[in-house]
Image: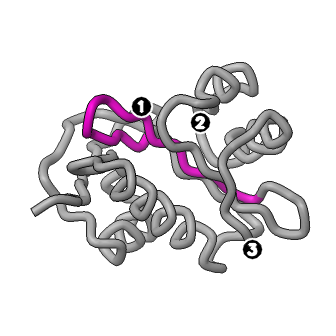
């Protein structure tokens, strides 16, 4: 398992992962627009993309847009590897924090983020649709 920057060669596989993971998936074109914007990382196993994380950056702030792992590769450390590498790169770039939203019912994701040092900082009411659900706002503070 290797974590690498997202590249054009990953986009078709990542679009398929998006369709498997999300009700409103990002298309290959949407993913392409994110190339070279912020920190977008892919986990490869045996030359195949099996998950990714996207983090848009503004000044010294990071906003995670998506974390997606192929359903048949979950619970194998892929998400953890992505979040750990993202945090390392965000620190190296001098970001003050990285923040994200998670569905309130997504206990595995929330546990992953808590394990990486993210803390609950708020709730966004009815943030998600299909079904309607609150989002837990979580932040990893990188500077003291």
Taking depth in this image into account, of 89 and 73 the one nearest to the observer is 89
Asked whether the residues under the numbered discs 1 and 2 touch, taking CB atoms below 8 Å apart as contact, a structural biologist would say yes
Q: Earlier in the sequence, mark 1 or mark 2?
A: 2
Q: Position of residue 59 (x, y in %)?
A: 27, 31
Figure quadrant of residue 8: top right
Q: Is residue 69 left or right of residue 118?
A: right
- Can residue 137 be seen at all in this image of the molecule? no
Q: Earlier in the sequence, mark 1 or mark 3?
A: 3
Instruction: Identify the mark at residue 23; answer none if there is no mark.
Output: 2
**Residue drawn at (52%, 29%), measured in percent from left and top?**
37
Q: Is residue 56 left or right of residue 114?
A: right
The residue to which callout 3 is attached is 1
Element type where label 3 sits in the image: loop
Q: Position of residue 132 (x, y in %)?
A: 36, 35
Q: Position of residue 54 (x, y in %)?
A: 52, 43
Q: Position of residue 12 (x, y in %)?
A: 84, 36
The residue to which callout 1 is attached is 129
Element type where label 2 sits in the image: loop
Taking depth in this image into account, of 34 and 89 the one nearest to the observer is 89
Determine if the magenta segment contains residue 4: no
Q: Quadrant of the N terminus?
A: bottom right
Q: CA distance from mark 2 to mark 3?
A: 27 Å
Q: CA distance from mark 1 to mark 3?
A: 33 Å
Above or below, 30 relative to 124: above
């Amino acid at each position: 398992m290797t974590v690498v920057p997202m590249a054009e060669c990953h986009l078709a596989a990542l679009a398929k992962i998006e369709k498997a993971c999300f009700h409103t998936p990002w298309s290959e074109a949407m993913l392409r627009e994110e190339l070279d914007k912020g920190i977008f990382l892919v986990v490869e196993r045996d030359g195949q993309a099996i998950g990714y994380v996207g983090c848009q950056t503004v000044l010294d702030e990071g906003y995670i847009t998506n974390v997606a792992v192929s359903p048949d590769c979950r619970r194998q450390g892929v998400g953890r590897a992505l979040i750990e590498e993202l945090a390392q790169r965000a620190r190296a770039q001098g970001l003050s924090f990285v923040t994200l939203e998670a569905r309130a019912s997504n206990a595995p994701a929330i546990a992953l983020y808590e394990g990486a040092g993210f803390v609950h900082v708020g709730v966004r009411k009815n943030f998600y649709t299909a079904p309607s659900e609150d989002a837990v706002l979580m932040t990893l503070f990188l500077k003291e």
